[in-house]
Every structure is written in structure tokens, then in C-alpha cells.
Amino acid sequence: MHAQDKVVDPNEVVLWSDDYEGHDVISTRTFGFWMYVLSDGMLFATLFAAYGVLSYSHSYYTGPTPAQFVAPWYTFIQTMALFLSVLAYGFAMTALKSGSKAGVVNGIIASILLGGVFLGLNIHDVLRMISIGVTPETSGGLSAFYALTQVHAAHIFIGLIWMLVMLYQIMRQGFTEDTVGRLISLRMFWQFQAVMWVFIYIFVYLWGYMS
Amino acid sequence: MATNRNYITGFVVSSLLMLAATILVDGHILPSFGLLLAIIGCAGIAIIAQVYFLLHIDISEHNIWNTVALVMFIPLFIITIGLTWWMFSQLYMRTMPMIPGMPGMH
């Protein structure tokens, strides 16, 4: 008989207990952070909604449309850099399971470098677009395009800073409950940015390029 | 669940789908509507692969509440984006005047 099949006894149930019964700190934090990650998804949903209503051809007025300034293969290389960064972070997390400090540190360093490549390519792409007159203030469509893609880039930037902080904490504290919990939260955050990037790459870059 | 093999599987599957989508769009291989359906399919499968292989969203006892939370969030995403898009498309259809020199509605 599993614990969840038992009838709830009000005198024994943990929720109404007078005493602190204790719980698994890491999985509780992980669930809490997953709630945050999903709320972050709602932030992206509002930006996708804004892009959806501002990506009609009249939204660009007579200015440039994504079909004229998106470079699919350039953005595909960005996609690969981000996916590889997420993969490297995954390797760091499996190294964590075997308690290998070197494995975790190497994985996170690789993840930072590849994430840096993604961000560098993004900045280069923005500068290229601005140099050919594709600026956020040109039209509503471009404002929505920049808002969505650069909010994602800002998430990547924050994630890279978080990784640097985690490297420092692993060096200083080792694998304590706090650092392991944070590494797991960062894993969810980082992987979620790759999920959001799939939506952005397909529905903003590629769809914009073909229409 | 969190093994190197799973992470590699998630990476390979989603990368190949992004590659396929890029080739299809760059080469204009399919007619416009078919192309759109094809890249939506690529995105959908890539996202399921990433959520399953990377984020470990499954029905194991350890992860079930993360999965429940995601499942309950999905309608919120769809309603937020879908209703907003629907409202504005109706607005444009009824109110958008034709201004000379301006590209038409699509």
C-alpha cells in the first residue's frame, strides 16, 4: 500500500501538524523555481502575443520586413551554439551526480563559452540590422521583433552571470545543499531558454523570413 | 533519467529538426502553407523532445507535480496568445483603412 492510498488522519497529516516535520529542501526549492520558470514562460507568451498582432504586413508600414533582413543560416548557427551550451550544462549535471567537481566546472565553463558565442552572434546580428536601417523605432512590427528577441538575449546574459556566480560558489563551498539546489534551478532556467528559442527561431525568424 | 544519453538524444533530435526547418525554409521546397505546417511540426516535436529529455517532464513519482504544473500552464499560454491574436485580427479586418502606398492586409 502506497502512502498516497492512506486515508488522511487530521491528527497525523503533516500540513496541519504543530511540529515541523521536515522535508526534502532541494526538491521543494526545485518545484518553486519551476513555478518561476513557467511564469517566465508567461512573460514570453505576452511578447509572442504582441509579436503576433504586430507582424501583419501593415505593421511594418513601408519599412523592412523580416523577409528582407533575417539570415536563416546565421541564426541557425546561433541555435546550435545555444543547444550545445545546454548540452554542456547537462554534462555538468551528470558529473554532479557522480560528485566530480572537475566535470561540473568544465561543463559549466563550456556552457558559458557557448552561451557567450550565442550572445556575441546576437549582438553582431543586431549591429548588422541597425547598420542597414532596421531599427526598433522604424515600425511597430520591428519594435515587437526586437522586444521579443532581445528579452530572450537578456535571459541568456543573466544565465551567463548566474553560471559565473555558481563557478565561484562551487570553488568556495563545494557541493552543499545550497549550491546543488541552485545548480538544478539554473539547469531548468537554461534549458527553458532553449525551449523558448525554438519558438522564437521557428515562429519569428523562419516564419518571418518565408512570409 | 538525467543521463548523458538523454541529454545527447534531446540535443540531436532538436538540432536535426531545426536543421530540417532551416533547409525547408531556405530552399522554399514546399508551397507556403505546407511549409508553415512542416516548420510548426518541427518546432512541436523539438519542444516535446527538449521538455522530455532535458527538463525531465514525465510521470515518474519524483517529477509528477512539475508535469502537472506544466500541463496546467499550457492552456494559459494558448489562451494568452490565441485570444490576443484573434481579437486584433478581428479589429484589423473591420477597421483597417486602405492607405495609398501601404501594403495590404494578409
Image: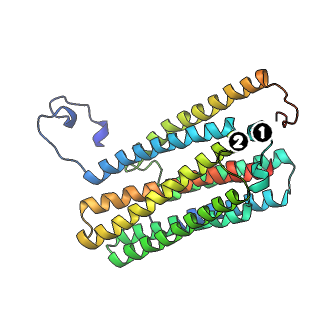
What residue is shown at x 66% (from left), y 51% (from top)? B43
Task: Please report the residue visible at 78 percent of the width from the left and 36 percent of the height from the top.
Answer: A58
Chain ID for label 2? A
Q: Earlier in the sequence, mark 1 or mark 2?
A: 1
How many neighbours does mark 1 have within 10 angstroms: few (below 14), some (14-19), or many (20 or more)? some
Name the one closer to the observer, B87 or B60: B87
Asked whether the beta carbons under mark 1 and mark 2 sit within 8 Å of each other, the answer is yes
The residue at 26%/70% (across/down) is A174
Give above or below for A149 relative to B78: below
Q: What residue is drawn where x is 28% and y is 42%?
A: A3
The percent position of residue A194, horizontal first and vertical second, equals 55, 57
Asked if one can make out residue A123 in the rendered structure from this viewpoint, the answer is yes
The residue closer to the viewer here, A55 or B51, is A55
Q: Position of residue B32 (x, y in %)?
A: 84, 47
Residue holding disc 1: A61
- Name the spot of residue B104 as percent of width and height, x first: 85, 34
**Residue type of the residue flagged with mark 1:** Tyr
Q: Which mark is drawn over residue A139?
A: 2
User: Which colour style is shown?
Assistant: rainbow
Residue B20 placement, left or right of A154: right
